[in-house]
Image: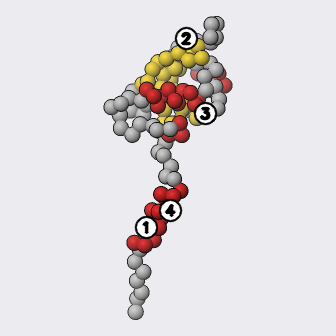
Amino acid sequence: MAGEDLIELKFRLADGTDIGPSKYSSSTTVASLKEKIISQWPKDKENGPKTLNNVQLIHAGKILENNRTIAESRLPVVELPGSVITMHVVLRPSLPDKKSDKLQNDSLKKSRCSCSIL
C-alpha cells in the first residue's frame, strides 16, 4: 500500500451522526465499506443493518454499486484534495421472504368474510 492513494471517508447516518473518519485504499470496494459500516454501527441505535443489501451508500447524489471500488465511484469535481469525503448511509428494510409473504396472504384470505345479500 506504500505510495497508494488513501482516501479519508466518513459515513453520515440518517440522524446526523457519523461513523469515521477512516482512511481507505482507493481499490476498496463499496461492499467492503458496507461491511465496515455494519461492523461499526452504533450499538445504541435500534434497527441497525443486518446485511449488505440493507445498506445504500450515497456520494454526491449517486447510489454506489457494491462491485465498484472507491476510485471508480469518486466524483473528483466535488472533492478537495486532503479533505474528508462524506458518504450518506441509507437503510433499506429487509424484504420479506416469499414463504412468509405467502403465509401472510393465505391468512388474509381466510380472515375475509364472504357475505351474501338476500
Residue at 35%, 38% (x, y): give it.
Answer: 46
Label 1 sits on what residue type? Ser
Tell me the CA gap for discs 4 and 1.
9 Å
Give the Cα separation between the discs numbered 2 and 3.
Answer: 25 Å
Q: Which mark is residue 102?
A: 4
Foreground tag (3 vs 1) = 1
In space, the residues marked 3 and 4 are separated at their CA atoms by 30 Å
x%, y% of residue 75? 62, 24
Give the mark, 2 or 4, whose residue is nearer the N terminus.
2
Residue at the outermost bottom position: 118
Q: Label 4: few (<14), some or many (≥20) within 10 Å?
A: few
- Looking at the rendered structure, the kind of residue marked 4 is Lys
Which quarter of the image is occupied by the N terminus? top right
Mark 1, secondary structure of its residue: helix
* Badge 3 amino acid: Asn
Q: Which corner quadrant of the image does residue 32 belong to?
A: top right
* Closer to us: 93 or 75: 93
- Which label's residue is closer to the chain start, 4 or 1? 4
Question: Which residue is disc 3 drawn over?
Answer: 66
Above or below residue 101? Residue 54 is: above
When asked about the image quadrant of residue 4, the answer is top right
Query: Foreground residue, 73 or 79?
Result: 73
What is the distance, in whole Å, between disc 2 and disc 4 at their CAs? 52 Å
Task: Residue 53 in the image: state x and y as whole percent.
Answer: 54, 40
